[in-house]
Image (tube, rainbow, N blue to C red):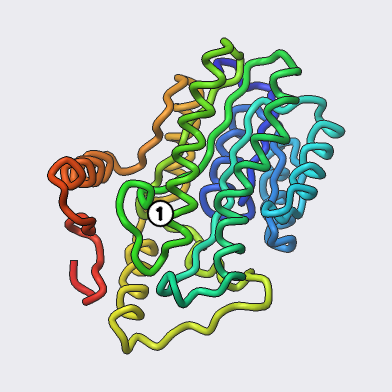
Amino acid sequence: MKVFQDRVAVVTGAASGMGLAMAARFAAEGMKVVLADIEAEQLTAAAQQLAMTGAQVLAMPTDVSQLSEIERLADAAYDRFGIVNVLCNNAGVSMEGRSWALSEADWEWVLGVDLWSVVHGIRTFIPRMLAGGEEGHVVNTSSTAALFPCPYSAPYGLAKHGVLALTEALYLELHDQEAKVSASVLIPGPINTNINRSAEHRPGGAVPEPEPTTDLERMIQDVKRLLTGGMDPAEVADKVFCAIRDDRFYIFTHPELQHGQTTDRVDRMLRDLPPSLPAGLPTKSGTT
């Protein structure tokens, strides 16, 4: 995509963090923006914040895990603005625990938000974007968790591996038919967002915060501290915008993780070694 003025962007997970930063970056380029998030009150505040800059904004409270809600989001975007040029499937949550101890509801919640929402977004928006005949771009948010094993966060790792594989397939399918719509996958490292408190919105209520007494709980606290000190979401938004403009597929926020984690994973596969966390990441002992 080369022209952004008066084009339309839809961003999920847009009430805060990377989603809000992306929406603000698009608005700064003269785009009309549709913000979707399950946090209705925070979403309204975010939309008002952007509207004060002169942007045309539509806020849609949305449970992205539900196909019917994504379809409602698409209908609202097209009813209001007539076209969608950029779709950022960005909403994400996380749930920590041993894979066999997490409940079916835990698995369904994380996979619903982190993976199925991307499937719903692709199936709902892309046919209409292609039919519109204009240049367009889809950005799906994966994670560096797609590049290494995710003990104690298996649903999140599974979802992010899936988003990466899905977006790679989507890119090739779009280019095979010479579509005007292209795709990128965002692979962020540690970013200072609200994902640490995503369990507050888990159906059935939040899971109580564990006391840091066991190896697992210490690891969870280490990861949360890593994220709190992470990159500013506005910097991520700049990288996303440039990737859309330049039609770059992989959007890594931390190049050092891109090379280190990818190389380590492939090397262990080629050497027939078991999985291991890359150097520099917290382990269950609380060290790095």
Residue at the spot x=43%, y=47% of the render?
161
Image height check: is 281 above or below 213? above
Residue at the spot x=74%, y=45% of the render?
70
Quadrant of the rendered structure where residue 92 is?
bottom right
Q: Position of residue 159 (x, y in %)?
A: 49, 52
The residue most toward the front is 272
Foreground of the two, 171 or 33: 171
Q: Position of residue 242 (x, y in %)?
A: 45, 27
Residue at the spot x=70%, y=56% of the render?
43
Q: Which quarter of the rendered picture does the N terminus lie within?
A: top right
Residue at the spot x=62%, y=22% of the render?
136
Report the amino acid beneath label 1: Ile
Q: Secondary structure at mark 1?
A: loop
Q: Position of residue 225 (x, y in %)?
A: 34, 69
Q: Seen in the image, is 187 located left or right of residue 137?
A: left
Q: Position of residue 132 (x, y in %)?
A: 75, 18
The residue most toward the left is 271
In the picture of the structure, the residue carrying the numbered disc 1 is 191
Image height check: is 32 above or below 247? below
Q: How many marks?
A: 1
Q: Which quarter of the rendered picture does the C terminus lie within?
A: bottom left
Quadrant of the rendered structure where residue 164 is?
top left
Q: Residues within 10 Å of mark 1 (few under 14, many from 20)?
A: many
The residue most toward the top is 178
